[in-house]
Structure formats: structure tokens, C-alpha cells
Image: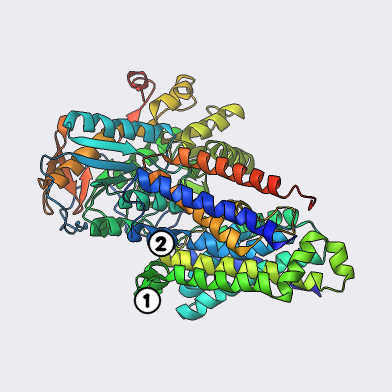
Amino acid sequence: MYKTMILAFGLSGALALAGAGRALADSPWTGGDSLPTNPLACDNTPGTAAAMPYDGGQPTGAPDLKGKKITVVDVPKLIGIGYFNATSKGIADAAKELGNVDVKTDGPTKANIDEQITFLDNYITSGVNGILFAANDPVAIAPVLKKALGKGIHVVGYDANSTPDAREWFVNQAQFNGIAKAMVDNMAKEIGEDGSFAIVTSTFTTPNQARWISEMAAYQAKCHPKMKWLETVEAQEDNILSFNQANTLINKYGDDLKGIFGMTSVATPASADAVTQSGKCGKIAVVGLATPNAMKPYVAKDCVKSVVLWNPIDLGYAAMYVLRAAADGDLKPGATSVKAGKLGELQIINGSEVLLGAPFIFTKDNINNFDF
Amino acid sequence: MSLTRLLRHETILAVLLAAALIVLAGQSDKFFTTDNLLNQGRLMAEVGLVALPMTFIIVTGGIDLSVGSIFGLAAILLGVFWKNLGFPLPVAMIAAVLVGGIGGLVNGVIITRFRVPPLIATLATLALYRGLAEGISQARSVRGYPDWFFVFGQGELLGVPSQLWLLVILAIAAAVMLGLTTFGRTVYAIGSNETAARFSGLHVDRAKMVIYGCSGLVAGLAGVIFVSRVSTTRSDMGTGLELDVITAVVLGGTSIFGGRGTIIGTALGLALMQALKDGLSLSGVKGDGTIVVIGLVLIAAVLIGNLLSRNGDG
């Protein structure tokens, strides 16, 4: 009797898997979100940035902090990886330049939203003046950020957004469709117009990766329709998991797999490592987002031809300046640009997003000029 | 085991808790405010709820490692039942909690019927349920719950967070059940000497099915409350929950070999852990430092427990 119970449970579980799984997929590729996409033109015409009304949230009862010393905490997705070490450095550099900011970086050691919320909650209680964040989940982080706004704390996001009304401003490293275009164009150049590829991402619900994947799907359908998407796998910004997932893809698809997209700065070097170790250097292209230092060995061996990124140090630097401007009352809803120290005037698009600039492609020719 | 020996570990724990609270309150003036303490109560409610049946399980000498996965599975199924299968939200909530109970019962069946050691059985179901959660959800999250749903996780009743009320009521019920009923006596007997309990005519298998089933049920409930607190469902929710829960229970004086433990101890252990996590963070210690301190406190508490029980109890 118990055996039949277990068999029934197992069968129903498998059926639920098959049925419900299909009902939930929105974007054509797994790992994308269901927000509207806006692919750029296939040639190099730049996209137009629409001017939209301000859609961020505002702190209630924020004290007048103009010119005064403020305490800020920076809570990235996780600490201990090169990318967020670089953004922390940018934030610290900006704080030193401004002179009246006391900033600390603290966060979970895994990219886990539950722990990130607990960190934010504790810092709200300890009474900081400002919060900088990179969200592990856009909706789950919203209640605690709204609580911060309700207590008069300034909230600015960078790298990974939350829902717009939970923060004042969001510093976007590059337009989502710009990153998508750079990634897909570089992959098409390496594997040809009818190559097949797979994607290694962080998790399917991480906001920035999900946005990029949706935009990549839209751009590929528009400009490289014959390319074939095979699979997206999750690697949660973990080195070992990314390596294992990439290896699994290589073994599963064999000769069908011509390229791997690495969507996080941890997945790309791990995928390049997997490709190198299985001897497929040159046969499987690896295109992705990564810090130049992590990719230098693979670019030197010609295993990886191009690495897409922006400058994360500049990203952190800009976020700190935006927060200071918001705390001082210099940056109000409806503004169209903001001054960010040595980066000059940054444009404000989509209502409450501050645009850092265009994505940057690192290749063999220029990668040795950078050190982060 | 006499009442005086039991009380000694809990008393030491209470003294330790009081000392920790005083030290942490001294480090940061924001720690000992009603606002902060109630907020911490809200944050520890999920771990606290799951720690209650876990106390019963560890007292019998077993363990349940799958609670985190059941938590995640219930959270995901809440979204699936509501959004994809179209159940009305209250029905979806109850169904999600019941699925947790079924998961716990499956654990119970594997442990009692097939005589698999609890560690192995729940280790296997940890992977099984997490895999089911990821597969069913395809890692999509479900959002857009109506406002009344958030009362469970974000609301308050008479100024005290709603889940804290639930935790206190269930804790009192669990304490009564463990300490004052024959079922509680059965649980202690199973932990002290299972063969003797069986031959004394106690329904050992039925008791185990009940506690593992309850563990799954409460993990499901905690999952639903967590979804209400963060207003979204994700398939990776609850990863690592089992470690926090077991730490709270063992810190509270429950012996991992079974036969010893109280709900009061678990409650004190839980409070101590949460106080340390929060107080250290408020006094400026970063995340990694807090984990080191909790590990040291756990070792210290277990050592004290061992020293005290050296009086021939075994």
C-alpha cells in the first residue's frame, strides 16, 4: 500500500513537471523575462532613448542632508567576486572624492535573495542615510526597499534593478538592447549565421540577466534568424557550478554546440575553462560578459575572441555620485541628466534610469590595457 | 533524566542569552528598541516555525534535512496553484501547505516502512523536492498577489507582526504536546531507547509518521508565510534553511542522539541565534564575522551540554 502511494506521488510529480512547465514559459528562450523588448537595428544605427515620465519612488520625510556627512551601505548581489569587488572600488573612490560620505560594502556570500533582504533590513534598522544595491530578485527586494524609502533613506540601484517604485534611481551600465546586440553580433561573427549556441546564466529570475536574454532573443530573431538556441542553464554566479554546467552542455550537444554565451562575469571564464579543458578551443566560441583580468589567459590563447562589458568601477562610481546628488536634493524627479564627477554628464532615460554609456568590447588588441 | 538536569542546560542558555542581549544593546543603541525586536521576531518566524517539529524529530534521534526543499516546493506550488491552475488564493494556500504535509509523510514512510536511516532518507528527499520545485516552476517566479495576502508576512496585529503571533501560539502548543502528553512521552522514549519503546507497546512507527508529517506541514506553512513576506515565489527559496533550524534546535540543548530536549530550549536557542545575527550586524560586524561567532557559540553550547550530562545519563 505504501509502495503504491509512493509510485502515485512520483508519477503525479512527473506529470505536474511536464504540464505546468510548459504552461509557465513566456519568453522564447528559457531564462528571459516577460517584459516588452526593443531590439536595435541590425546595422549600426543607434537606438533612440525614449524620454519617459519619472517612475521611481521617493523617500518620505528624508532629512535635509545637503553638504552634510552621510552614511551609506552598499549591498551587492554577493560579495567576493571580481565584478562586485570592482564596483565596490568605484563606490569607495567616489566616496573619497566627495569627502563627506562614509560607505561600507556588505552582502551575502551567495547570490541569495533571502539573505540580501536580511542584510538590508538590519542596515535600515541601524539608521543609514543611503542604500546602494544590486538586486538578486526585482520583486522580492521591493518590500524591504520600500520600507527604507518610508524611513527617509535614499535608495539607488546599480547593475540589477528592482521594480521602479522601490528605488529613487537606477544606474544602468548600458542599454539592455545595446548589450544584447553586442553579444549576438559577436557570436554571429564567430560561429556563422546558422550556428547553434547555448547560454549559461545566473538564475532565470535575476533581473539583469533575464532582461539581456529577452533582448538577445528578440534581436536574434530580427537580425540573425537562422541561428539556433539550444538551452539555457543556471549557474548562480558560482565558479564550480558554472564550470560543471558548461561541461554538461559540451558533452550533451557534442558537435552541435558551436557557441556558449556567458551571462555573468563568473560564467564566462568558467565556460572558457571548460571549452579549453575539453580541447575544443577554437571549435566552440565563447562570448560573454566578464572582467578583463579573468579572460586574459583565454584571449591570449585565442580561445575567446571578444569579451563584452562596461567598466564596473565606473558603474560603482556613478552610483555613488547619483546617491549623493539625490541626498543633497540636486537630483530631482524629472531631471534629464546628472553630473557624475569625472564621468561628466550622464543621461537619464526611461524615467528613472541613469545610463552609464555603451558596452565595451575587449579583444586581444586592447584587453591588456585594463586591470580589473 | 530528571527535571533538574534538564533545566540546567536551559538555565545556562537563558543566562547566555541575557548576557548576549546586554552586550549587544551596549554596542548599538538601535538594538534594544521595540521596533527592532519585533522586526527580528518577524524575520525569525520561518526558522522558528520549522524548528518546532524539528525538536520532536531530533529528540527521537532522527533528523529531517528536507525541510528547506519542502519550504521551496510549497512556495512554488502556491504560485503554480494560484496563477497557472486558477485556484482561488485561499484554496491555493491550503493546498500548498498540504503538499508540504504529503512531502513529510513520504519521508515518514521511507523511514518507517523501508527502514532507511532518517539522515539518508531526508537527504534524498532534499534533492527530490528541490528538483521538483525547480522543474515545476521552470524557474519562473509568480508575482502580483492581492494586498490581503501580504498580511501574513508583512502585517501586524496589535503592533506585533502576524507571523510572530502564529509562532508563539504554535510554540505553546508544541511545548504542551512534548512535555505534558503521552505523545510527548512516546517521543522521548523512542529517542532514549527505540527497541525498548517498541517492546513496551508504544506505537513507534505511527509516532514517527506523525512527526515527520507535521514537519513537512509546518515547513509548507513557513513557505507560504515567506512568500507573503517577500511578495514573490522563487524556486531557490529555503536553501540552507535546514542548517539554521538544526542549529537553533541543537543550541537549545536537544541532544542529536535523542532522548533529551525541550521546546523552551529551542526557543532560547532561536532567540540567541537571531540576537547574535542582528546585534553583531548593528554593531558593525560584517556578514562573515557573524557566521564565525554563531559557530563558536554553537560549539560552546554543545560542550556545556555534554559536561552537564556526564552524570551517568549517557
> Residue at horizontal 84%, vertical 67%?
B197
Q: Is residue A369 above or below residue A211?
A: above
Would you say B12 lies left or right of B37 here? Answer: right
Q: Which residue is mark 2?
A: B230
Q: SS at mark 2?
A: helix
| Chain label for disc 2 | B
Q: Which residue is mark 1?
A: B148
Check chain identity for marks 1 and 2: say if they share one: yes
Q: Is residue B230 above or below residue A81?
A: below
- Which residue is at the front of the view, B7 or A45? B7
**Image spot of residue B185 (x, y percent):** 74, 70
Would you say B101 lies left or right of A52 here? Answer: right
- Which residue is at the front of the view, B207 or B98? B207
Name the colouring of the figure. rainbow
Amino acid type, mark 2:
Val
Q: Earlier in the sequence, mark 1 or mark 2?
A: 1
Amino acid type, mark 1:
Trp
User: Does the residue at mark 1 contact the one at mark 2 (Cβ under 8 Å)?
Assistant: no
* Residue A339 visible, this orientation: yes
Would you say B196 lies left or right of B86 here? Answer: right
- Which residue is at the front of the view, A17 or B119? B119
Q: Residues within 10 Å of mark 1 (few under 14, many from 20)?
A: few
| Quarter of the view holding residue A27 | bottom left
